[in-house]
Image: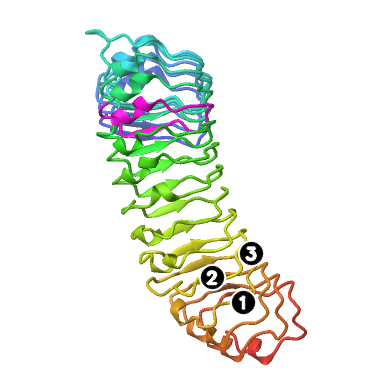
């Protein structure tokens, strides 16, 4: 029989027969979401088997000889009841092993010899085995997902795994990082979010040759050491939910940075960001920023700017000359006016200035002709200007919680794309015919 593919997922299968080894041409087996309690050792005799998926079952172990399945490249056994992996599993030819969502507490020493990718996330691992490199156990692994475990530290000799390109140790209990991380010259993704790091070792900056994503969200960081400008390839930097008061002065030397999240800190200034020419999205919400640099227009490729939940009382005119800006979020500040330059050199699509102290909308809205969403709820606005007729692309208008008395101007009927209109909690005495004209 020359069966090459066996898909039997989403059934009530309890057992895979030993005779499955007779299917010598079998290349792919998918039996996920059944009630299988064990894999027969005979499955390792399927020389052509390259993909095995037994996730969402009731496995307690893997066959001790699983490493002898010479053709097996992808093995997925997530969401089972496995407590321990076979001693020699690292000697296999698997390029991807996924044993996430099990009950594993200890990993075998051979694990680092896997040729490529290991996912042991959402287990109960408290410590990693020592990294010993030998002819039999080489450090071949390149991709490690260790998130959602109970790790308190990483091996100091992690630099022995010179092929590592991806490390995810988020949602653990790490309080330190090994200085040897800086020697991983091919590392391009490092996720240490949701841990307990009080400091970031400056040696991490030594991986500037390759590192493109650094995630330090939700730690205990009070400072970021100077020298971060060495990360010339860094594209995404996540620093939200820490205790940062200042940003490093050489931050504007991150010449490749495109995405930056510094929200939920205690920052007072964005000055170190001036000069980030390739930055596309900036989230600086939930800080203590009271003023913005006058040179905001130097962020010429920025198209999303989030400054919500700060202490801003004014916005510099230069913000109207940020030519790529599409979305601007300023809600929950102390703004009384908006700069008249807003919209002059840009094609704004979304603006949120709700929960501020504004007393009026801009009189001339022609500069906002590309606007799709306007959120001005919870201010002190008393009327809607007639120039609103120029906002032909507007589909959402929120003016709830203001002081509007006269209702809608006649020109509102020209907004043919308007789909959501919020006017709750105003002082409007009656609906005019202009409301009926809306389609």
Percent x, y of residue 288: 57, 48
Q: Quadrant of the N terminus?
A: top left
> Residue 66 in magenta?
no
In the drawing, does residue 315 fall left or right of residue 72? Answer: right
Disc 3 target residue: 356
Q: Is residue 314 above or below residue 79?
A: below
The segment highlighted magenta reads: 185-207
Judged by its main secondary structure, the magenta piece is loop
Which residue is pictured at 29% across the width and 16% down the height? 160
Q: Position of residue 264 (x, y in %)?
A: 56, 44
Q: Which mark is residue 360?
A: 1
Residue 115 falls in which quadrant of the image?
top left
| Viewer-nearest residue: 187 or 306 | 306
State the image coordinates of residue 235 (x, y, percent, origin top left). 33, 44
Q: Residue at x 61, y 68 (%)?
A: 336
Q: Secondary structure at mark 1?
A: loop
Give the Cα separation between the discs numbered 1 and 3.
11 Å
Q: Residue at x 56, y 88 (%)?
A: 386
Residue 193 on the magenta segment: yes
Q: Check residue 338 in the rendering and tell me which mark sits there, or answer none.
A: 2
């Amino acid at each position: 029989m020359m069966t090459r593919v066996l898909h039997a997922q989403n059934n009530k299968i309890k057992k895979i027969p030993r005779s499955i080894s007779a299917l010598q041409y079998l290349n792919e087996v998918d039996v996920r979401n059944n009630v299988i309690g064990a894999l027969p050792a005979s499955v390792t005799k399927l020389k052509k088997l390259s993909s095995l998926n037994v996730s969402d079952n009731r496995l307690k172990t893997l066959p001790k000889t699983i490493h002898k399945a010479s053709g097996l490249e992808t093995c997925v056994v997530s969401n089972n009841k496995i407590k321990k992996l076979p001693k020699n599993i690292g000697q296999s030819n698997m390029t991807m092993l996924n044993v996430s969502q099990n009950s594993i507490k200890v990993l075998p020493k051979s694990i680092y010899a896997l040729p490529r990718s290991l996912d042991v996330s959402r287990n109960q691992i408290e410590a990693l085995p020592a990294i010993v490199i030998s002819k039999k156990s080489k450090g071949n692994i390149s991709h490690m997902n260790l998130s959602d475990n109970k790790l308190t530290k990483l091996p100091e000799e992690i630099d022995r795994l010179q092929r590592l390109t991806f490390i995810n140790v988020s949602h653990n209990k790490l309080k330190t990082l090994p200085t040897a991380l800086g020697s991983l010259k091919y590392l391009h993704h490092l996720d240490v979010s949701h841990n307990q790091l009080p400091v970031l070792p400056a040696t991490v900056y030594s991986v500037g040759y390759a590192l493109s994503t650094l995630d330090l969200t939700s730690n205990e960081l009070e400072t970021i050491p100077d020298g971060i400008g060495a990360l010339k390839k860094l594209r995404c930097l996540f620093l939200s939910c820490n205790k940062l008061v200042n940003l490093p002065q050489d931050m504007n030397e991150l010449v490749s940075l495109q995405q930056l999240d510094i929200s939920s800190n205690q920052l007072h200034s964005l000055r170190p960001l001036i000069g980030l020419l390739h930055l596309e999205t900036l989230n600086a919400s939930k800080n203590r920023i009271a003023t913005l640099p006058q040179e905001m227009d130097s962020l010429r490729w920025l198209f999303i700017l989030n400054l919500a939940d700060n202490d801003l009382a004014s916005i510099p005119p230069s913000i109207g000359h940020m030519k790529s800006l599409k979305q601007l979020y300023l809600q929950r500040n102390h703004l009384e006016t908006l700069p008249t330059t807003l919209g002059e050199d840009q094609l704004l699509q979304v603006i949120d200035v709700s929960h501020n102290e504004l007393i009026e909308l801009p009189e001339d809205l022609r500069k906002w002709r590309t606007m799709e969403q306007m959120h001005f709820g919870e201010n002190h606005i008393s009327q809607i200007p007639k120039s609103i007729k120029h906002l032909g692309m507007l589909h959402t208008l929120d003016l709830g919680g203001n002081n509007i008395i006269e209702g809608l101007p006649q020109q509102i009927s020209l907004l043919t794309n308007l789909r959501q209109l919020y006017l709750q909690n105003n002082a409007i005495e009656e609906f005019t015919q202009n409301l009926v004209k809306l389609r």
